Image (tube, rainbow, N blue to C red):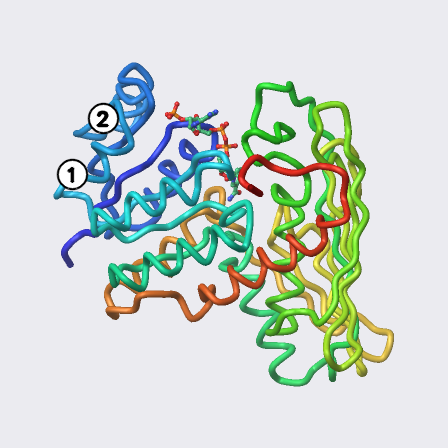
Amino acid sequence: MEKIRWGILSTGSIANSFVKDLQHVPDAEVVAVGSRTQESADKFADTYNIPKRYASYDALAKDADVEVIYIATPHSMHAENGIMCMRAGKAVLCEKAFTITASEAEQMIAVARKEKVFLMEALVTRHFPVIHKVLEWIKDGLIGEVRMVHANRCARGQFRQEQRHLNPELGGGSLLDVGIYVIGFASMIYGKPPVDAVGYGHVGEFGSDEQGATLLQYDNGALAVLSFALRTAAVNEAYIYGTKGHIKLPDLFAVPEKAILCVDGEDKVIFEEALVGNGLHYQVLEVHRCLRDGLLESPRMPLQESLQLMQTMDKIRAPWSFRYPNDN
Ligand SMILES: NC(=O)c1ccc[n+]([C@@H]2O[C@H](COP(=O)([O-])OP(=O)(O)OC[C@H]3O[C@@H](n4cnc5c(N)ncnc54)[C@H](OP(=O)(O)O)[C@@H]3O)[C@@H](O)[C@H]2O)c1
């Protein structure tokens, strides 16, 4: 089978993990990397034996050998980088959070449709084997009608101002960085956007939200209670409660390998499957499947849902006391 040729846009932390995990996809080949500097591009390319290395993202986008580009820049740059790549005719896998605002997401999606290129948000949790099993249990009615989702995605990190995580200039803050995981989780379980969303966020010393919590309500009265933090550690469990039973994911966001199905107060089934590598390649398998089937978006992570996730996050943070430069 002919290999699908990847370009890597930026050389930071997750870009390194991503390229390492591509080894688990036999029909993937990394042909080029683009960085803001030649030095980082060379270092990255030498480490992973990548033939072409560029000192600009633009040069990467213009490389005729590259079919699909993985965007791993800070949130504030996703829309600009994605639009540039798609206008150059490339398929794009763009890291979460998809953009900073719903308005930027609309622009990204409009360009994907105009250029007729594939675009997908890299919300990695959606592609884990354990998630497929959980969705199957729900579809088979094993816990009845889902009425409540509880999930935390919280960690205590030692971040400096210049790092992207809490830096508003780079789209930092807990909602966009890790809140997207729990909000995306609820969206996947319910298969629709909430009709209402409220939330609190604590804006810390760097001027972005260090932690927050949100309550989402769905049209049938179902709820999601979600928390997210970059400076507060918590037990990162997720629970899905239905009318007949519940499902517990003990460590969905760190070690997403186990789910427990509980019916009538008893643990009935335990699903366990060890993650391969860091688990980043599962989303690549989905990209490859879509590209080979000629799809312009993934049915598992549709563009309309990425837009709705940004709309929900816009709504949650609207009352908060800070704005991103991209909000203007
Ligand atoms: N899926 C996951 O599990 C996961 C995990 C962590 C992060 N992420 C997402 O991946 C993206 C990148 O996160 P990361 O932790 O890898 O970030 P990072 O280590 O800070 O790397 C970001 C890279 O973006 C480039 N960049 C362009 N403009 C920049 C600027 N003004 N300041 C800093 N870097 C800039 C740099 O690469 P060059 O110097 O080569 O241009 C930098 O190395 C984010 O969207 C994040 O939410 C996903």
Q: Residue at x 71, y 37 (%)?
A: 322
* Residue type highlighted by circle 1: Asp
Residue 289 in percent (x, y) is at 31, 64
Q: Is residue 208 left or right of residue 103?
A: right
For mark 1, what is the residue?
63
Packing grade of label 1 (10 A; few <14, some 14-19, many >=20) is some
The residue under the point 25% across, 63% down is: 116
Please state if 260 lies on the left or on the right of 290 as rendered: right
Q: Residue furthest front?
A: 328
- Placement of 123 over or under 196, stated as above or below: above
Q: Measure the C-alpha gap from mark 1 to mark 2.
A: 10 Å
Name the secondary structure under disc 2.
Answer: strand
Q: Going by the image, does 12 lie left or right of 140?
A: left
In the picture of the structure, the residue carrying the numbered disc 2 is 54
Q: On the image, which quarter does residue 197 sit in?
A: bottom right
Are circles 1 and 2 on residues that touch, CB within 8 Å?
Answer: yes
In what quadrant of the picture does the C terminus appear? top right
Task: Give the position of the N terminus as an image quadrant.
Answer: bottom left
Q: Nearer the viewer, residue 285 or 213?
A: 213
Circle 2 residues within 10 Å: few <14, some 14–19, many ≥20 = many
Residue 191: x %, y % from top left = 60, 74
Which quadrant of the figure has residue 48?
top left
Nearer to me, 34 or 22: 34
Residue 173 percent coordinates (x, y)? 66, 36
Q: Amino acid at mark 2?
A: Tyr
Number of numbered discs overlaid on the protein picture: 2
Q: Is residue 159 visible?
A: yes
